[in-house]
Amino acid sequence: MRDVTTLSELEHLGAAAAEADEIFQMDEDAFRLFYDRTARPVWAYLSRMTGDARLADDLLQEAYYRFLRATAAHDSDEHRKNYLFRIATNLVHDHRRRPRMDSVPIADGVDHADPRQQDGAGRAVNRVDLSRAMARLKPRERSLLWLAYAQGSSHQEIAEALGLSASSIKALLFRAKRRLATLLQQGS
Amino acid sequence: MAPQDDFAIERALRAEFEEACREAPLPNPGAVWWRATIRARAEAARTAGQPITAIQGVAAAVTIGAVAGLGGLVWRSLSMFRRFSDVIDVVQTRRSDIEAASSIIASHGVPLLLALVGCLIVAPLAVYLATDE
């Protein structure tokens, strides 16, 4: 009787898996590969844009769910990744419209300044100052700077992730970086 | 903006990215996949049930309207029985007036009107409640 139950469960799981492959735009194996490649950068992006690690956990699951349910066609894996970041960006912006009282800030107030960050002039940017300055930027500025300099995305990739024109990225980035520098100087 | 400021900002952001990737508490991809599967199936089941719920709502509204109309008919009948003796006297004396009034009431169909009003008021509300997520 136990074997019959196990077989039934396996059949049920198999049917559910087949059904999931029909519902979603990719099968489970392809999803695992895609997830392994993108999950860390996406979580890092969500946690630093929201300033809340626990919220980033929830938004990560939501982002992948919306990605799987989307019916948009993708030319390449890079295109899929940019689309995923577009979803993540929208989730961050949606969250901003709903104030959250139990947010836990990422920076813990301890100076984690890494000596390796110091340039030739001895100027360093520690995590706390950076976190505070980033929090004072506009959401789009924050996203631009993170995708460009933290993640190393190209202007085209940034444009696709944020829904902007590629030609405008350079100017927007320049202004965002200048604003961040000003905020860092004010903070120090 | 001095180039060294530029460089320091880029390095700080890159370091922050690496730190965030190191600390990321990622769930297993299989868990993410299965949660998404369960949620998709639940949403599909809810969507499939919506037309049935709407039909049930409309049926309930029609039933309520019909009951309201029937109740009006019964009420009028009971009133008529109570005043039966008076009505007989009135009918005797004002037969032609009674005939005219009866034809007007029949043509306007007051009980049917009650049923229609009940449907018009209750049906949209029932459909709204049935389809509201």
Image (cartoon, rainbow, N blue to C red):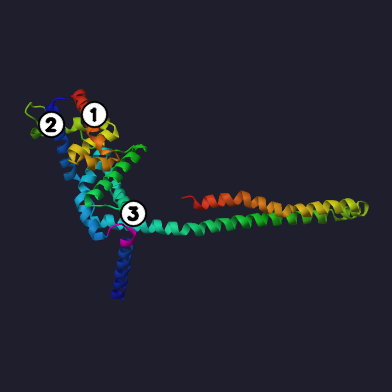
The circle on residue B73 is none
> Which residue is denoted by mark 2 in the rendering?
B7
Residue B58 seen anywhere in this rendered image of the structure: yes
Q: CA distance from mark 3 to mark 1?
A: 36 Å
**Residue under disc 3 on the same chain as residue under disc 1:** yes
Magenta segment includes A127: no
* Residue in the picture at 19% in, 41% down: A154
* Closer to viewer: mark 2 or mark 1: 1
Q: Secondary structure at mark 3?
A: helix
| Span shown in magenta | A21-26
Say which quarter of the image contains residue A115: top left
User: Seen from this angle, which residue lies furthest front?
Assistant: A167
Kindly identify the amino acid type of the residue bearing the numbered disc 1: Arg
* Residue in the picture at 28% in, 35% down: A140
> Measured from the top left, where is residue A103 in percent x and y?
30, 38
Mark 3 or mark 1: which comes first in sequence?
3
> Which residue is denoted by mark 1 in the rendering?
A175
Q: Secondary structure at mark 2?
A: helix
> Which residue is denoted by mark 3 in the rendering?
A69
* Closer to viewer: mark 3 or mark 1: 1
Q: CA distance from mark 2 to mark 1?
A: 15 Å
Kindly identify the amino acid type of the residue bearing the numbered disc 2: Phe
User: Local crowd at mark 2 within 10 Å, few (<14), some, or many (≥20)?
Assistant: some
Q: Is residue A59 above or below residue A115?
A: below
**Residue under disc 2 on the same chain as residue under disc 1:** no
> Measured from the top left, where is residue A127 in percent x and y?
17, 33
User: Local crowd at mark 1 within 10 Å, few (<14), some, or many (≥20)?
Assistant: few
Along the viewing direction, whichever of A64 and A149 lies nearer the viewer: A149
Magenta segment includes A24: yes
Residue A51 seen anywhere in this rendered image of the structure: no
Q: Is residue A145 above or below residue B77?
A: above
